[in-house]
Structures are given as structure tokens and as C-alpha cells.
Amino acid sequence: MYGLSEADREIQARAREFADELIPFEDEAERAGGELPRDVTAAQAKRARELGLYATNMPADLGGPGCSYLQQVLVQEQMGRVTNALGWVAATPPSWLPAVATPDQIERYVRPAIAGEREECYAITEEGAGSDVDAITATARRDGEDYLLNGVKWHVTSYNSADYAFFQARLVGGPHDGEHAMFLVDLPSPGISVVRTPAYSHTISHHHPIVAFTDVRVPAANLVGAEGDGMSFAYEWFRYERLMVAARCLGAAARLTDEMTAFAAGRVVGGQPISEYGLVAGMLADSLTELFAARSMTYETARGIDGGADVKISHAQCSMAKLYASEMAGRVADRAVQVFGGRGYMRENMAERFFRELRVERIWEGTSEIQRMIIARQMTKRTPTALA
Ligand SMILES: Cc1cc2nc3c(=O)[nH]c(=O)nc-3n(C[C@H](O)[C@H](O)[C@H](O)COP(=O)(O)OP(=O)(O)OC[C@H]3O[C@@H](n4cnc5c(N)ncnc54)[C@H](O)[C@@H]3O)c2cc1C
């Protein structure tokens, strides 16, 4: 199905096998606030690397597996079958960085990230700048051979495990005054402190603290690209991440659909399996139908990128895939909780966990409303026919 090549099916099977190894750890993670013992997580990360499922987005000439976009989607789809973000051990370092990094940055950040020795986090969002990234107020001021960074960043995912951050700021002074720039900031560095670590709906080991940067000094060699480039990197990152969000939502919806179908076929109420009641059968049928549509759309978008599609068209298609797959997965999780009845409300049931965890897929990497705005803008600019 889906016209997958032998190599595609092989990496898909490898990823599925790995996801099946992670699933038995979900309940323990849920009970422990998302944390597994360090040695367990380290062994899982090692296994992801051995299986060639780590850094799948990184080119072979830098030591990565050099997978196609479709293959990256196939891997992340399987990781999406696992709750509590345990699949994040099959991490994907910043896909856009090798193209813009200096040789020095390649050695200090890119190669170690591909080897699994360094991990990044993104400090872009602020209290008053989320959907509207252009509203950021964090600043970067040139000071001799360095820049001084200031600002308070929100929702900095994985700050607790990362050892470097991408920090986006507005330049103050100089020829690019007011424009954006992005910096690589080593963690910890003097002047960086956690304001607080709020609790979120999901139970995962990656925290999303509010982080203050106060006169943080970074060498000019840590500027990514040129002054004024900041926003373009964020767009590149969003495009990639939106497609991978779609992929993980496919995996979540697939597992939910499998498990609710098996449960509905076996759960007898009033003398017959609940799957034979039309109202339940409808929930099963709608779930698979929508999953089929979302998967076809996501795979097609990945194939387009692999085939060298126009970047603006891919941008709109990544938004469509993210929008539809995340909303589809949310509906499927809601139905799954309903099909499981009281069992679906227990944290030990994957439907309950997905019900909470999938909610953020409609918010991060651009909310559903922002995706709709992007799609509609491209429709009027390029015609709907050009996009789908
Ligand atoms: C768990 C989690 C992890 C995150 N991780 C990171 C991270 O690692 N790094 C990082 O930088 N950020 C991160 N974020 C931030 C995330 O990207 C933002 O929350 C998201 O982009 C939305 O921004 P906001 O929260 O400011 O909402 P707002 O922008 O305040 O939006 C509020 C509401 O208004 C709507 N809205 C806003 N503008 C428009 C418009 N033009 N048209 C229609 N509706 C609109 C939105 O859709 C939403 O419904 C994370 C967020 C969460 C929840």
C-alpha cells in the first residue's frame, strides 16, 4: 500500500519494531511523571542509533543516515505510536542547520548532535510572541567580538536535557537594527536562569520552562547565518517540524484505531460485541477513514519534497498535513476514550494518555488557526489547484 519501496518498508518495519520495544515502558513513565531511570533512557537512545532511527534527517556526508523525507515520515509515524514522548529518543537534530552552519559550527554542534552527543532546545516564543513570531522583544547587541543577549523565553522544550539553545532575538544597533538574528547558546552559560517550570497536560520527561537570558555573552562565531536571517531559519524549521507532527499524529491515530477496534470486537454488552452497535461501528469507521486520508496527504507531501517541489507549495502542504493530521488524531483519541468507556478514562490506558498528549499538536509549531491562515493565503496567491 501507498506505493512504498522495499527500502521504505524496511525502515518502516525497523521503526515499528523499536516502537513496540518502547511501548511496555509507557505505564512506568506515566506513573513516574514521565521519567524513566537514566540507564533505561540511555539504552533506548543507543538502540535508536544502532537501528539507524536517530538523526534520520541528517545527510550521510556528515554521518547521518541520509533518509528521504518519506522515510523520515515513516520513522516518526512509528514513534508517534508511543505515548509519554518515549519515541523522542529517535530524535531529529535541526534539519536546516547543516546548510547554513559555518565549518566551526558544524564541528561544534552539527556533528556532535548527529552522534547523539549534543541536544538542542529552541528559545523563540515569548509571553507576547507566539503565533506572531515577529513580535519578539528579546534583543541581541553587538559588543566587540561578542553579542549580548537579553530576553525571557517561554515553553523552552527540552531545556532540562539540552546542552545548547537556539535563541532568536531582535538586533539592537548596527546596520541590521530591528531585524531578527538567531544564535547558538551553550547551556549552561552565565546569565541564563529558569524563571519557573510549569506543569503541562502531558506527562513527559522533557520540561518546557520559562527561561530568562540576562546579558548572556556569546561569541560572534555563534551567530547562525547572517544578521537579519533569523526568521528564515524559523520558517524552515516550522516546515520540517509540521510534517513530522503530522507523521507522529498518524502513528498515534493508528494505534488508537487498532486498540479501540480490538476492544470493541471483544467487549460484549447486551449479548453482542459493541462493534456491532451502529453508534460504535461509526466511531471505528470514521477513525480509519480519516487516518487513511491524513496518511495519504502526509506521504504525498513528503514525496513532493523528495521530488524537489516548489518550497512555497511544500510550505502550504506541510500546513495542510499538520492541520488535518493533528485535528484527525484529536478526534480519534476522543472516540477511543468513548469506545473504551470507563477504561478509557484510566491513565493506564493509552487512549487516556493520547487524549491529553495529542491536544498540543494543534497548538505548537503553529496553531490550527495559523495553519489555516497560511493555507488560505497561498490559495489566493497561487490558486487552490497549484497546492492540491
Ligand atoms: C508544550 C509546548 C511546548 C512548546 N515548545 C516550544 C519550544 O520549544 N520553543 C518555542 O519557541 N516555543 C514553544 N512552544 C510555543 C508554541 O509554539 C506556541 O504556544 C504557539 O505557537 C502558540 O503561541 P501562543 O501560545 O503565544 O498563542 P497565541 O499566539 O497567544 O494564540 C492564542 C490564540 O489566538 C489564535 N490566534 C493568534 N493569532 C491568530 C491569527 N492571526 N488568526 C487567527 N487566530 C489567531 C491562536 O490560534 C490561539 O488560538 C511550545 C508550546 C507548548 C504548549
Image: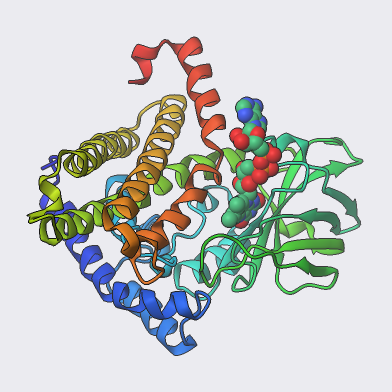
Q: Tell me residue 98's x, y (percent).
A: 51, 53
Quarter in which the C terminus is drawn: top left
**Quadrant of the rendered image containing residue 231:** top right
Is 174 drawn above or below residue 13 in the view shown?
A: above
Camera-side residue of 183 and 126? 126
* Left/right of residue 349 with respect to residue 116 in the rendered view: left
In the picture, measured across the screen, residue 217 lies left or right of residue 55, that is right
Residue 158: image location, x then y, percent: 59, 66
Is 23 rendered above or below residue 168? below
Indicate whether 307 appears above or below 168.
above
Residue drawn where x is 42% and y is 25% of the image: 313
Front-most of residues 312 and 383:
383
The answer, for residue 141, to whether it is visible in the render is yes
Q: Residue furthest front?
A: 270
x and y, in percent, of residue 198 in the image: 69, 64
Colouring mode (rainbow / by chain / secondary structure / one colour): rainbow
The spot of residue 258 in percent (x, y) is 19, 55
Quadrant for ligand 1 reads top right
Asked if residue 230 can be seen in this view, the reply is no
> Residue at left 21%, top 39%?
279
